[in-house]
Amino acid sequence: MATNLIDRTDLLSLSEAARRLPGRPHRCTLWRWHRHGIETPAGRVRLHIIRLGRKVLVAPEDIATFSRSLTTAAARTFEPRPMLPPVSRRMSRAEAAELEADAMGL
């Protein structure tokens, strides 16, 4: 990534980034997202960080990219559940099965 870090004023520490995220995850959670990523059916998604000496920084656009990647992976693999018939129809099917069993002599 060819970015001039000296001119960047929007870089956040992991603690600052965690405070800005919904649900306020712990800073270690962001580190885990970088280190191990999150496994999705479409593959592993990792958070990109910037190391500057001992500092670990993250850019807001990298958090947005990470979130977008997870959302896209989830949308691609989403399969709606089959609809169950209403309870009244399920009962009538059970009754029909009983009638059929009686007709067979069971």
Image (cartoon, rainbow, N blue to C red):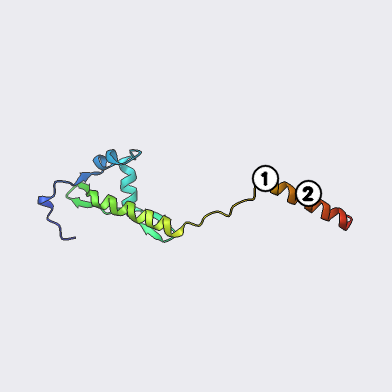
Residue in the picture at 33% in, 51% down: 67
Residue sitting at the far left: 6
The location of residue 84, given as percent across then percent down, is 62, 51
Of the pair 34 and 105, the residue shown nearer to us: 105
Callout 2 amino acid: Glu
Dot 2 falls on a residue whose secondary structure is helix
The location of residue 41, given as percent across then percent down, is 44, 59
Residue ID for mark 2: 95
Question: Taking 79 as reference, is 74 left or right?
Answer: left
Dot 1 falls on a residue whose secondary structure is helix
The location of residue 94, given as percent across then percent down, is 75, 49
The location of residue 68, given as percent across then percent down, is 33, 54
Callout 1 amino acid: Val
Q: Residues within 10 Å of mark 1 (few under 14, many from 20)?
A: few
Residue in the picture at 28% in, 51% down: 64
Residue ID for mark 1: 87
Residue in the picture at 24% in, 52% down: 61
Indicate the quadrant where residue 26 lies. Answer: top left
Q: Quadrant of the C terminus?
A: bottom right
Of the pair 63 and 54, the residue shown nearer to us: 63
Of the pair 54 and 28, the residue shown nearer to us: 28
Q: Quadrant of the N terminus?
A: bottom left
Q: Is residue 77 above or below residue 21?
A: below
